[in-house]
Image: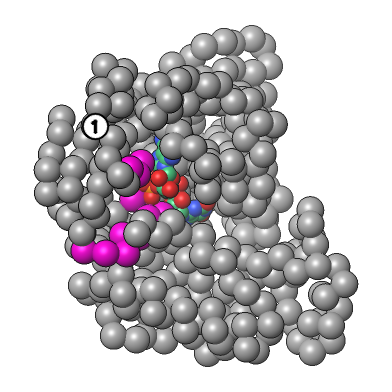
Amino acid sequence: MIYTDYNLKRLNSFALNCRAKTLVEIKSEADLLQLPNLLDKKNIILGKGCNTIFANEYFDGLVVYLQNKGISIIEENTDYVVIEAFAGEDWDDLIEFCCNNNFWGIENLAAIPSSVGAAIVQNIGAYGSEIKDSFLSCLTYNPIENTWKEYNNEECAFGYRYSIFKYPKRFEIIWKIRLRLSLKPNPNTSYYAIKEKIEKEKINISSPSQMKEIVTQIRNSKLPDTKLLPNCGSFFKNPVVSEEDFPKLEKLYPNIPSYPAPNGVKLAAGWLIEQTGWKGKRVGNVGMHSKQALCMVSYGDATAKEILYLAQEITNSIKEKFNIELEKEVHIVL
Ligand SMILES: Cc1cc2nc3c(=O)[nH]c(=O)nc-3n(C[C@H](O)[C@H](O)[C@H](O)COP(=O)(O)OP(=O)(O)OC[C@H]3O[C@@H](n4cnc5c(N)ncnc54)[C@H](O)[C@@H]3O)c2cc1C
């Protein structure tokens, strides 16, 4: 289905008003193969719009809205199962499918608002898990070159909220993905909030559904509901500083939370935001949530201009106080 002058308000979780010159809804491979004839000067891919900010009120190009659905079991043995899911599938429906079948591996990623395709793009992570831990491969389509390509786990170069699809050099659509999930009970209770809850309530985790419930409860108690306070989850990435620079920071701020990271020391962006006085602060129609400093929320009809202004003010404050450059986790569409 092709739409012109399409209002994207209900297709982005900040509920921003933006009209797209053209939107094409892709449900089947036949729809996908029409794309080479529809491409414009600007082309973007859209899943559920939960990590996307439309910077302007008009997008002068083509929005490729992925709605291809389907989940199937490809391979099964006594230890593990390989499942295949199409990119336009709702992430929570995939979680539900896996939990109902007792497939272990992605239950800690429950309740992350996402399409299956976008989950790969930024290697979604939460509560001690990342999708890369279960990811086997994906199949992509490039409508400019009219080519298909398969990527394995290593080729995606996954990192913290990163894969090669995050800042793409080529226009490549993730069409479907494969995950390898365990059939043997494998609860991941490494994250402190999960550990704390199961110890306090004396819970014995025997199914992925149980873990999904625990994660969902913890998330709901902490994160604002996008229906009430539109948002994109974490607005910034947690910054990583070098091993050499960290002791200088720790000397100045002995309570600074820190975590080991492959390329240095990871800091909590939420803590930095709190220290610069932005937690719970509102500027016009936007603000940083009072319970979750890393989450920028809209209190009404926020505009992208207000969102980006506040983001810049926060970035400046943190640069000034800590000499740390914050990087946005959200994707800004110009
Ligand atoms: C309340 C809330 C909580 C959140 N919590 C978390 C969390 O715990 N952990 C976490 O990691 N994230 C979290 N997020 C961020 C968000 O859920 C993820 O980034 C999610 O993957 C976005 O999915 P989407 O389908 O909405 O992506 P979109 O916003 O539609 O797209 C995101 C990016 O992926 C690209 N893209 C989308 N689909 C495809 C495809 N098929 N092929 C190629 N490129 C594609 C888009 O072009 C865009 O660049 C949260 C967001 C919200 C609103």
| Colour convention of the picture | one colour
Q: Residue at x 36, y 85 (%)?
A: 282
Q: Is residue 45 left or right of residue 8?
A: right
Question: Can residue 249 be seen by looking at this rendering?
Answer: yes
Indicate the position of residue 243 as horizontal and vertical percent values: 85, 68
- Residue 34 versus residue 28: which sits nearer the camera? 34
Quadrant holding the C terminus: bottom left
Indicate the position of residue 260 as horizontal and vertical percent values: 79, 60
Examine the rendered structure and indicate whether residue 217 appears above or below residue 320: above
Indicate the position of residue 101 as horizontal and vertical percent values: 49, 23
Examine the rendered structure and indicate whether residue 200 appears above or below residue 151: below
Q: Which residue is mark 1?
A: 38
Examine the rendered structure and indicate whether residue 12 appears above or below residue 104: below
**Outermost left residue:** 4
Q: Residue at x 65, y 41 (%)?
A: 158
Query: Where on the picture, by quarter, is residue 305?
Result: bottom left
Question: Can residue 116 be seen by looking at this rendering?
Answer: no
Q: Residue at x 52, y 47 (%)?
A: 166
Label 1 Cα crowd, 10 Å radius (few <14 / some 14-19 / many 20+): some
Q: Is residue 15 left or right of residue 2?
A: right
Query: Where on the picture, by quarter, is residue 68?
Result: top left
55 magenta-colored: yes
**Outermost front residue:** 41
Quadrant holding the N terminus: top left
Q: Secondary structure at mark 1?
A: loop
Q: Amino acid at mark 1?
A: Leu
Q: Is residue 6 left or right of residue 229?
A: left
Question: For disc 1, does the CB lie below 8 Å from ligand 1?
Answer: no
Q: Which residues are magenta?
A: 43-57
306 magenta-colored: no
Indicate the position of residue 256 as horizontal and vertical percent values: 73, 79
